[in-house]
Amino acid sequence: MAVKIGISLIAWQNDDLPELTAAFTTEGAMEDAGRIGYQGVERGRRMPADTEGLRAYLDRYGVALCGGWCSGNLMQASVAEEKEAIRQQVEQFAALDAPCIVYAECSNTVQGEIGTPVSQRPKLGRDDVLAYAAKLSELARWSADQGVVLSYHHHMGSMIEDAEDIDWLMEGSDPALTLLYDTGHLHFAGADPLAVLDKWGDRIHHVHFKDVRQPVIDRIRAEDRSFLDAVAGGAFTVPGDPEGSIDFQAVTDRLKAMDYAGWIVVEAEQDPAKAPPFDYSKLGYEHIVSICGRSGLQIEG
């Protein structure tokens, strides 16, 4: 069993806070990612929209498509409506052999609202999440039939944020719906990343390695600030940063024990003026290679 190491280009191209990364191009980010050694990148909004154009773009930089964000609207839309809304992305990702679509409900999230504290995120009851999970299972089964796995991304500021939300979502859905496991969002939400991994390891299909700076999170909570305030303030960083708080060796040991064989993707949005994207992305890559070696988790290629 082997893993692949990918990266989200959000350190170079932040779509939620574009002013942070205005000095960087997607082309430069792709060149940096390939030069560092990353085997894949998650799809960004500034990449070519058409399938063949995107394929040529990826080939030019020698990287694969290792997933990509999908803003879900299933709380408001019917399953049939949501199928049509995401059909183009599903077909494209199937054609490009992407491991999954990174799906998250965004109809009611506050993650993109800089004036709304993350504490004001929607918190649903168990019955509402179970009902949502049943609809989402139908969508996931359809997507799988098209050749693309749906991996749900629990996210700060959204209705599926903490360990309880994840429990309800997984309990109410069938195995066609998989889980994207994001260390940084779990820690920020007050969850124990290792406990979630132990409980739902059999449903995890895609992994984001994101570290956090605890003092920044503490300040955001104390001042009741927004998710975007946290991003701009430096809440997130890459694995291997001495300022980080998460024990990635322990996480990687668990992944090895459960025979995980998917992608490990570095995703760490930061202010590039304070954290140069190439340097930090290289640090993250080298740290993952090191801890995988110590865990005995083979890296493909």
Image (tube, rainbow, N blue to C red):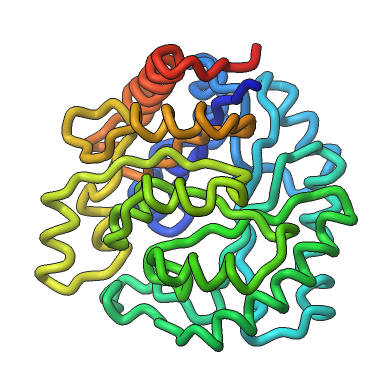
- Residue at coordinates 79% horizontally, 33% vertically from top-left? 55
| Quarter where residue 249 is shown | top left
Q: Is residue 224 above or below residue 145?
A: below
- Residue at coordinates 71% horizontally, 21% vertically from top-left? 60
- Residue at coordinates 70% horizontally, 56% vertically from top-left? 150
- Image spot of residue 64 (x, y percent): 69, 29
Q: Is residue 99 above or below residue 240?
A: below
Q: Nearer the viewer, residue 105 or 56?
A: 105
- Residue at coordinates 64% horizontally, 16% vertically from top-left? 300
**Number of dots carrying numbers:** 0
Q: Is residue 148 left or right of residue 28?
A: right
- Image spot of residue 129 (x, y percent): 55, 80
The N terminus - image quarter: top right
Q: Is residue 216 above or below residue 138?
A: above
Q: Is residue 6 left or right of residue 209?
A: right
Q: Nearer the viewer, residue 212 or 40?
A: 212
The C terminus - image quarter: top right
